Image (cartoon, rainbow, N blue to C red):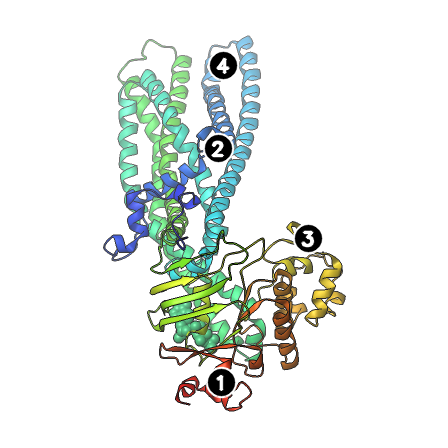
Amino acid sequence: MEQFQTASSTSPVDDYMSDPLLERQAHPSAAPPPQEKSHSFDRLFLKRLGRLLRLLFKGTDGSILKSSILLPYSIFLLLSCGVEVIVWFVGLIPSRFYAVLGSLDVEGYWKVLFQSLGFVFLVAVGKSLQTFSSKILALQIRRILTEHIQACYVKPKTIYRVLLFHEDIDNPDQRITQDIDRFAEAARDIVEPLVITPALIVYYTWKCWDVGGYLGPLFIYSYFIVGSVISSYLIKPIVELVFRKESCEGDFRYLHVRLREYAESVAFSRGEKEEQIRADRSLNTLLGAQRKVINRELPLEAVKQIHSYFGSILSYIIISIPILAGKYDTSDPSKISEIISKNTFISMYLLWKFSSIIEQATKLSDLAGYTARISELFEAINVIDNDLENVEIDYPYQDGSPESEPFIAFDKVTIASPSKKILISDFTARFYTGNHVLITGPNGSGKSSMLRVIAGLWPCTKGHIQLPSNHNGQKSMYFLPQSSYLTFGSLRDQITYPNLASNTEISDEDIRALLKKTRLSHVEDLVDSFDTQYGNEWYKMLSPGEQQRLAFCRAFYWKPTFLIMDEATSAIDESTQSHLLQMVHESGSTMICVSHNSSTRNLFDTFVTFNGNGECRVSHSQDIDINDDALDKAVLRDPWSLSDE
Ligand SMILES: Nc1ncnc2c1ncn2[C@@H]1O[C@H](COP(=O)(O)OP(=O)(O)OP(=O)(O)O)[C@@H](O)[C@H]1O
């Protein structure tokens, strides 16, 4: 027996999740529910960042050596180190000029001049290459994280469940398309200061001590510690605000996406004014959130600026101490000028390196916000992957013989909506091939929910379900929903969906036959060729009824054992509707059909009727007079009167 939706140990999301702290975040049931979500610069941020970095540096075989980020990262680091070496020589240029000009050394002057031109050229080229390689690195970070998250997110049932069961994960699309990119940019900006700067600080500390004594490093370190304590105090609230701003950004964008999607409905109902008010409201919320970030960044920016400008005076204070103490009394003025210049460069550079760490504070707060948004999505997916259902679903003929008769069986199944409303209680039934089933009942009684459970989209509260498995390449079940999903691609792609046409074989003649069968032959005139690619145009080229008919082409192409339809003919005219159902009947597929339409009832053998109170009954055509007009009332409108007859 195959357990439905078991946790997969090979799931890409497992690469991300394995830490108890993250597990607790991901399984609210395993820990006391947090009062309020925290998105700040804390231990959880470091853990999450660590997970993302591990993902980035994990190669195809799990080793860091096979990681596709290793090469751009190494090139970037090497270039950064090379640039720093050249910067050292560039920084000494003024002091060398002081020395040769002060001692009127003409030969030395020309030598220093040519060397300086060489160093300046090298530093310019090196810095350009460093920026270029850092952009390539950011691109690679985005590619790895996006591919990974797409592998976790765009997989059977996951998108649906994230959207349905994790309302806390606002705008997952924005997290994938935008937040990862911003994370990559922020990471690119801070990787160099955080990785190379410590080594530079050690080197420049030694040089600073050498020139100005121990007081130089002491002053600079104290200065840095005071600056970083103030910065970290100011960063904390910004992380949370960046998170909120991103969330508002997503809501605002989504509002406009919906406007585009429902432009016709809005126009029909003259709802533009109302929509404009909503859009303005959403914009105000977003700008308010953005303003809060800007307000909070002001003191941080002020600290940064004060730190950087005051630092330039500090370098003179540092060198003034040994000079005023008489350490260089015996040196000539040109030597003292050289020492002042050299010390100013060293102290300033050391201070600048420290300041650049403080400057990363703002970027770090952005990084923490983006890390939280990306990680939350990973964690929600992990919950879904580990979400063992209470119901067991069997595929008894997984390896079964062709003689085995496939069926769909419910054994005391109870289904509840996500809001815990019981829709079906203790339902038992068995649908065999050739036994066409019509499911009816009032709106909201649970008809579609039963199909969602068969498709594995919703869990059952209790019970046991048996489903047929695919056999010899034939799909056991194919679902036609009410609103047809038209994929971006060619007409050939539409018909072979969910497979890409390029991975399947379907001739032009087969396509024409399918179009004829579904009374869509005119669609051939709408497209340049069966392989011409179209995007959203499909929804404009075809009316809703034609879209539903195109979905029937798919059903005839796949010839599933069970064709499961959820009001899949609701937009189709009556004559074509009965023609299509008759065709399905003749094609050998067994229909399980949710419908409010009674005109095709003679094509069905079994009637499942919901009463909207969690009760559901099954009757068979041999037990009732199928042509009896009273059946409309009995089966379709008031199914419970049937049992009274
Ligand atoms: N995502 C959801 N969250 C909470 N409740 C839901 C959700 N989807 C459906 N429901 C609830 O489940 C109930 C059954 O919905 P379902 O779609 O199965 O009804 P139905 O019988 O197919 O209705 P209709 O004939 O209108 O299509 C409804 O009351 C609905 O409010």
Mark closer to the chain start, 1 or 3: 3
Q: Quadrant of residue 558?
A: bottom right
Mark nearer the viewer, 3 or 2: 3
Q: Quadrant of ligand 1?
A: bottom left
- Relative vertical location of residue 368 with respect to residue 89 in this rendering, above or below: below
Residue that extends furthest to the front in the rendered view of this protein: 403
Q: Residues within 10 Å of mark 1 (few under 14, many from 20)?
A: some
Foreground pick, 596 / 305: 596
Q: Is residue 221 left or right of residue 57?
A: left
Query: How far is the residue under mark 3 from the one under mark 2?
Result: 37 Å
- x then y, percent, for residue 363: 40, 43
At x 53%, y 60%, the residue is: 476
Q: Is residue 23 left or right of residue 255?
A: left
Residue to which mark 3 is pinned = 505
Residue to which mark 1 is pinned = 624
Indicate the secondary structure of the residue bearing disc 2: loop
The amino acid type found where label 2 is placed reads Ser
Indicate the secondary structure of the residue bearing disc 3: loop
Residue to which mark 4 is pinned = 101
